[in-house]
């Protein structure tokens, strides 16, 4: 399986000024990619750029053979769903309201959901053990529960690519492993491409298949095996 979903061509990204040299990256069906780098290296900027939230400085991003900058903004959420590290601006929504937002790319301006939309929402809430807390506001949930709702919303959005910024931040050891195991299952069982940033390098290595490593002005791509064999981990104790 090597169906490329995201391809970048000489991509430069950052906040008006490029944070790295131009990069060419590929992400395929079934990939679970961990983005690793020092604080301030540009991990969040890269993920926001790939998601279409932040415009690129230069270069191109393709979804399959479609250049994302030339697609309508209303179409992009059908390709890529994004899970932010801190969903504070969503905290007053209920679990159901946030999960249901996953269908917004497919509904009309009145956000009228079909019976199939409603069934998908209900089935996914059940799958993620969220049905009983459906009317609870996000602010009342634990950090692990919030992340579960955010991933549930991304699954309901039914995109081939799911991008997550620091999804394991603030979670305890057991919940981190459970969340990453769920993401790996998504990549394998539903043929999703998962891209996430993390400082939990040792745990992430158990679940990812590929590494995008910020090394000074470069982003280097490794398979998990290459990354481990090069013993790069010994140099990352301060990451």
Image (spheres, rainbow, N blue to C red):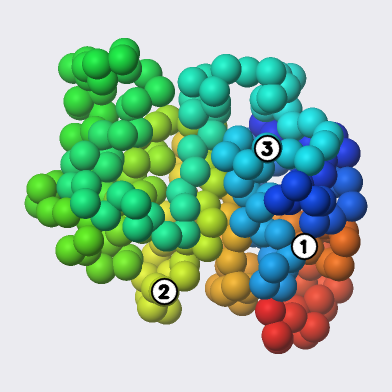
- Looking at the rendered structure, the secondary structure element under dot 1 is strand
**Residue for badge 3:** 55
* Residue 239 versus residue 123 in the image, above or below: below
Residue drawn at point x = 80 percent, y = 83 percent: 235
**Between residues 141 and 139, which one lies in front from this camera angle?**
139
- Looking at the rendered structure, the secondary structure element under dot 3 is loop
Question: In this rendering, does residue 54 appear at all?
Answer: yes
* Residue 135 versus residue 71 in the image, above or below: below
Q: Position of residue 129 (x, y in %)?
A: 21, 52
Q: Nearer the viewer, mark 3 or mark 2?
A: 3
Q: Residues within 10 Å of mark 3 (few under 14, many from 20)?
A: some
Q: Position of residue 46 (x, y in %)?
A: 68, 50
Q: Nearer the viewer, mark 1 or mark 3?
A: 3
In the rendered image, the quadrant that contains the C terminus is: bottom right
C-alpha distance separating marks 3 and 2: 28 Å
Q: Position of residue 31 (x, y in %)?
A: 64, 45
- Dot placed on the residue nearer the N-terminal end, 1 or 3: 3
**Residue for badge 1:** 213
Q: Residue furthest front?
A: 16
In the rendered image, the quadrant that contains the N terminus is: top right
Residue drawn at point x = 81 percent, y = 76 percent: 232
**Between residues 129 and 167, which one lies in front from this camera angle?**
167
**Residue for badge 2:** 170
Q: Residues within 10 Å of mark 1 (few under 14, many from 20)?
A: some
């Amino acid at each position: 399986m090597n169906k490329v979903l995201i391809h970048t061509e000489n991509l430069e990204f950052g906040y008006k000024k490029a944070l790295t040299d131009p990069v060419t990256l590929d992400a395929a069906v079934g990939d679970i990619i961990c983005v690793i780098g020092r604080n301030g290296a540009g991990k969040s900027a890269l993920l926001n750029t790939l998601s279409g939230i932040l415009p690129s400085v230069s270069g191109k991003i393709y979804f399959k053979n479609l250049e994302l900058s030339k697609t309508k903004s209303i179409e992009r959420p059908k390709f890529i769903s994004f899970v932010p590290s801190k969903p504070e601006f969503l905290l007053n929504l209920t679990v159901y309201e946030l999960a249901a937002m996953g269908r917004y790319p497919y509904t009309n301006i009145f956000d009228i959901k079909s019976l199939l939309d409603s069934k998908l929402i209900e089935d996914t809430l059940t799958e993620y053990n969220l049905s009983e807390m459906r009317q609870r506001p996000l602010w009342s949930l634990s950090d692990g529960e919030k992340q579960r709702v955010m991933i549930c919303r991304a699954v309901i959005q039914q995109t081939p690519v799911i991008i997550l910024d620091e999804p394991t931040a603030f979670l305890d050891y057991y919940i981190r492993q459970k969340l990453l195991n769920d993401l790996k299952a998504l990549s394998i069982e539903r043929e999703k491409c998962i891209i996430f940033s993390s400082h939990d390098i040792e745990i992430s290595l158990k679940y990812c298949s590929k590494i995008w490593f910020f090394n000074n002005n470069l982003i280097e791509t490794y398979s998990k095996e290459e990354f481990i064999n090069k013993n790069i981990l010994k140099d990352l104790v301060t990451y």
